[in-house]
Image (cartoon, grey):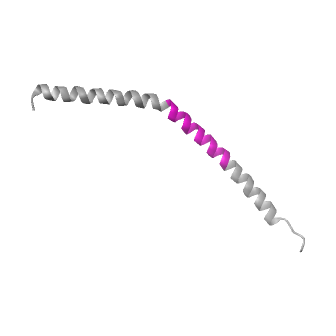
C-alpha cells in the first residue's frame, strides 16, 4: 500500500470518527435526561412498594374477627 493510500485511509477513518463524536455528543444530553427520569421513576416505585408492604404488614398483623 502506498503512502498516499495510507494517508487517504487515515483521513477517511478520521472523518468517520469525527462524525461519531458529533453524534455521541448530541445524544449525550438526551440520554442523561432519560437516565434521570428512569432514576426518578425508580425512586417513586421503591417508595410505592414500601408503602404497599407497610399496608400489607399492618393488615396481616391486625386481629381479624372470626368468620
Task: Give percent across and percent down for residue 8.
Answer: 18, 26
Q: Residue at x 12, y 25 (%)?
A: 4
Q: Quadrant of residue 14?
A: top left
Q: Residue at x 84, y 65 (%)?
A: 62
Residue 60 colored in magenta in the image: no
Screen quadrant of the C terminus: bottom right
Q: Which one is nearer the viewer's eye here, 59 or 34?
A: 34
- Residue 43 falls left or right of residue 32: right
Range of residues picked out in magenta:
29-45
Task: Give percent across and percent down for residue 1.
Answer: 10, 32
Q: Residue at x 64, y 45 (%)?
A: 43
Count of numbered circles in the view: 0
Q: Quadrant of residue 21?
A: top left
Task: Give percent across and percent down for residue 36.
Answer: 57, 37
- Residue 59 falls left or right of residue 28: right
Q: Main secondary structure of the magenta part?
A: helix
Q: Residue furthest bottom?
A: 67
Vertically, is 41 above or below 15? below
Residue 30 colored in magenta in the image: yes
- Residue 61 falls left or right of residue 15: right
Task: Give percent across and percent down for residue 27.
Answer: 46, 31
Q: Quadrant of residue 38?
A: top right
Q: Residue at x 24, y 28 (%)?
A: 12
Q: Residue furthest left?
A: 2
Amino acid at each position: 500500500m502506498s503512502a498516499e493510500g495510507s494517508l487517504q485511509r487515515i483521513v477517511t477513518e478520521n472523518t468517520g470518527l469525527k462524525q461519531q463524536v458529533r453524534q455521541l455528543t448530541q445524544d449525550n444530553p438526551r440520554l442523561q435526561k432519560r437516565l434521570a427520569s428512569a432514576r426518578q421513576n425508580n425512586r417513586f416505585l421503591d417508595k410505592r412498594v414500601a408503602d404497599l408492604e407497610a399496608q400489607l404488614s399492618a393488615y396481616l398483623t391486625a386481629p381479624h374477627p372470626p368468620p
